[in-house]
Amino acid sequence: MSLTDRLAAARGRSTETMDTPAPSDTSGGGSVPAPASNGPKRKTAAPKGDPFQDLKRVVHQRLVETLGPKLYDAHMTQSELEQQVRLALQTSIADADIPMSSADRTRVSQEIADDILGYGPIEPLLRDPSLSEVMVNSFQDIYVERSGKLVRVDTAFTDEAHLRRTIDKIVSKIGRRVDETSPMCDARLPDGSRVNAIIPPLALDGSKLTIRKFSEDPYTVEDLIGFGTLTRPAANLLEGCVRGRLNILVSGGTGAGKTTTLNVLSSFIPDDERIVTIEDAAELRLVQDHVLRLESRPANIEGKGAVTIRDLVKNSLRMRPDRVVVGEIRDAAALDMLQAMNTGHDGSISTLHANTPRDALARLETMVLMAGMDLPVRAIREQVASAVDLIIQQTRLKDGTRRITAITEIVGMEGDIITTQDVFLFDYAAGLDENGKFKGGLKSMGLRPRFLERLTDHGVHVDPAVFATGGTLR
């Protein structure tokens, strides 16, 4: 069948579907009523009709038929594959013999190429450097985060099946799966962007896909200073803390920028040290040469073969690491991480979810209890106070910016309580500017941290002027 015949058949099916009347109720009363919804209806604007939808569907099918084996040819480079796909695209669209402007022809070709080579309608969003997150709420309901604000975009998948195919393409590249038996999955894109997918029956209104984008070039400390995330004096102090082998936790809420800060902190580790990174989905991109990257693995379809973060932390201690960097502590792995920090693996860095430094300590204690070792609370707190030296609190403020709002030192124990002191705090009292942005920054509390002696022992010297009071540090 020629491409023109296929296109005509596709149009016929579309018309037939549109003209099909509602089925009649044979029990004697009019048309069958629509089934009642069990929940509130969400208002979603239907995507605008695409006059070339049938053409794209037919050309896509033809390309898959002709290039099918080549799409999975391991010996073909990405550039060679793209060249063959675009050449076949030009031929197929020309064979369709449909009047199209040059702009329409370019757009249709790009959309089909994105579908075959990339991730369909969200591929242009992933290429846009101004976007930090892409959120697919349903096949026709897509939002993005731009400058810390959520914005709906005028793009959509063809249908639920199209969205599911895109999700499968993403997760299958790292050996994971999403189906009815395993309807949730954490994955990553080749550039390190974090992906979460959840499908029915857990997602009631259709499959959901959330992608937290990472910059093609990892952010540096200069970038964070430019964004206002931290100040120059604070950056110099944190660099000294990392080089001085302090154990550091980065605490914050979802989307606060913890992983970005962890990546920047890791860049301060000297090049002559052996670093082991442990993550659920490998996102960190360290610039050093001697880096060993480990990634956890979920259970297979039979419920076996899972390798947890805790398993990897235990194994990493047999790999002669100078530093252990854990992407996030969220369960009983906290106990093994604390033991590593207390048994000669100084300079370890990790993140966890918490709203304040004090909450971070409480959550760390709770996660240690999840290990089921029946340890007394005082013993856990002593372990935490001995292991953790510094907590960096990161917050996503209401103006959409991500700021480090506290740098807190763990001082020790007084009775059964872990004592802390804030070295820097964010100056909320500075207020907002005319654009609703926070004007404040990190402000020294005028306290000299006790860990300065340890830094000196490692040959790291911090200018005492950093801790002087006198306003917000820039």
Image (tube, grey):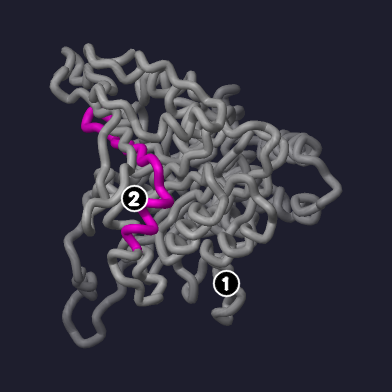
Decide: marks 2, 1 in contact (CB < 8 A)? no
User: Residue 314 in magenta?
Assistant: no
Label placed on residue 237: none
Q: Judge by depth and name the residue closer to the eye, 93 or 40.
A: 40
Name the residue located 32 percent from the left edge and 29 percent from the top edge: 403
> Is residue 66 shown left or right of residue 357?
right
> Is residue 110 shown left or right of residue 91?
left
Q: Judge by depth and name the residue closer to the eye, 319 or 283.
A: 319
Name the residue located 40 percent from the left edge and 59 percent from the top edge: 330
| Position of 372 relative to 212 (above/below) | below
Label placed on residue 353: 2
**Residue 82 percent across, percent down from the top left:** 73, 37
Label whose residue precedes the other's in the sequence (2 or 1): 1
**Residue 395 percent across, percent down from the top left:** 29, 36
Q: Give the range drawn in magenta.
A: 380-400
Residue at the bottom extreme? 27
Label placed on residue 306: 1
Report helix, strand or loop for mark 1.
Answer: loop
Q: In which quarter of the image is residue 169?
A: bottom right
Name the residue located 34 percent from the left edge and 27 percent from the top edge: 147
| Position of 446 relative to 252 (above/below) | above
**Kind of residue at badge 1:** Ala
Name the residue located 52 percent from the left edge and 65 percent from the top edge: 310
Report how many numbered discs are placed on residues in the image.
2
User: Residue 397 in magenta?
Assistant: yes
**Kind of residue at badge 2:** His
